[in-house]
Image (cartoon, rainbow, N blue to C red):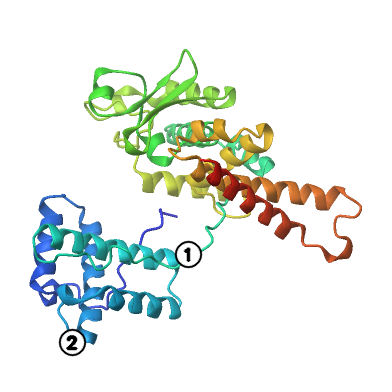
Amino acid sequence: MPPRQRVPSRPQGEDALPEALPHSALRYLEHVRFERRLAERTLALYTEDLRKLQQVAAAQGLDVLALQPFHIRQQVARMHSQGRSARGIALILSGWRSFYRWAVLQGLLEVNPVQDVRAPKSRRPLPKALGADEAVQLAAFRQPMVDANGAAQWLELRDAAMTELLYSSGLRIGELLGLDLCASAQSQQQGRGWIDWQEAEAHVIGKGQKRRSVPIGAAAMRALLAWQQVRDPARQWPGQNALFISQRGARMSPQSAWQRLRQRSQAAGMAMPVHPHMLRHSFASHVLQSSGDLRAVQELLGHANISTTQIYTRLDFQHLARIYDAAHPRARAGGVDVKAGLDAAGDRAQGKDKAQK
């Protein structure tokens, strides 16, 4: 399952109609295409946002540059009433806000009408994490490696090492696939991470090009060493020093890693297909359950703000609630909703933490 992305919901046959947009919108699209060098898929999302904005303006009989904040708020309310998610509305508003910010810089407007408009608030969904037993079962799973040319062994050792490292160190998929075999001048120049085989650490480049070092567990190190023995440098592309490569020798793509882990989780008997970020969530949840040290989990995950890490406290409360329900003879007495109470306690704790900052 690939990473979730907002897909343009455009009718068939309308793809080739960017000229239907107003001149200001077309100028903006040219700007983001050439100045910001956006990928085609991202450009398609920007185009779709502007189509929606053009529809709002047309319904009012106005140009997009004549829309006022109350027009935008009316449209937000309309989208919300039609069932569009808060996140979906926020993404659309972000696209509109960027367009109007550019228009202000170009002198086409004095005020950005979307500047102070916000999407409806929604409760942030809990990250999906495996139970500790399930995560260990998946990480320890090994498939038969008998075939004529050794391809099955090569793939199995690579996929096992990827799975072990994802769960052992809580890496993002981009961080995992950005790792080189070892530190080098090329790694530094290209902003790549690497494996320190002596210290059993992964030096990764996270969001915002922030570097951090995370420990690698013993089981993951064994899997990495087994993979290193069969990786075969002769197979890699010239100039490549990637830790995880495809059968053709290129650095593995996120899509390929997603597909391989999904297949592996099904072969291992998981109740649901597992994606790479689920192992990161599992790592965070299990370390927090064992240590109770939120700051340490923040450092290991590479979160800039601890409020991002605090969502795992809600998973921890769920874990405690299940233990309480199973162990306490009066846990369900009087129809008390223990989970709701613990969730509320978690929300209060997060609010208190923010107030103290």
Q: In this view, does 24 lie to the left or right of 71?
A: left
Picture mark count: 2
| Position in image of residue 171 (x %, y %) | 46, 36
Above or below 61: residue 24: above
Decide which of 178, 326 is in the foreground and name it. Answer: 326
Check disc 1 and report the residue beneath it.
121
Decide which of 55, 166 is in the foreground and name it. Answer: 55
Number of residues whose C-alpha sits closer than 10 Å to that of mark 2, classed few (under 14), some (14–19) or many (20 or more):
few
Number of residues whose C-alpha sits closer than 10 Å to that of mark 1, classed few (under 14), some (14–19) or many (20 or more):
few
Decide which of 110, 59 is in the foreground and name it. Answer: 110
The residue located at (62%, 53%) in the rendering is: 347
The residue located at (91%, 52%) in the rendering is: 329
As helix, strand or loop, the secondary structure at mark 2 comes to: loop
Report which quarter residue 138 is drawn in: top right
| Position in image of residue 58 (x %, y %) | 20, 84
Above or below 185: residue 353: below
Above or below 270: residue 139: above
| Position in image of residue 232 (x %, y %) | 36, 24
Check disc 2 and report the residue beneath it.
61
First-in-chain label (2 vs 1): 2
Tag 1: amino acid: Lys
Q: In which quarter of the image is the N terminus?
A: bottom left
Tag 2: amino acid: Gly
Report which quarter residue 104 is drawn in: bottom left
The residue located at (16%, 50%) in the rendering is: 36
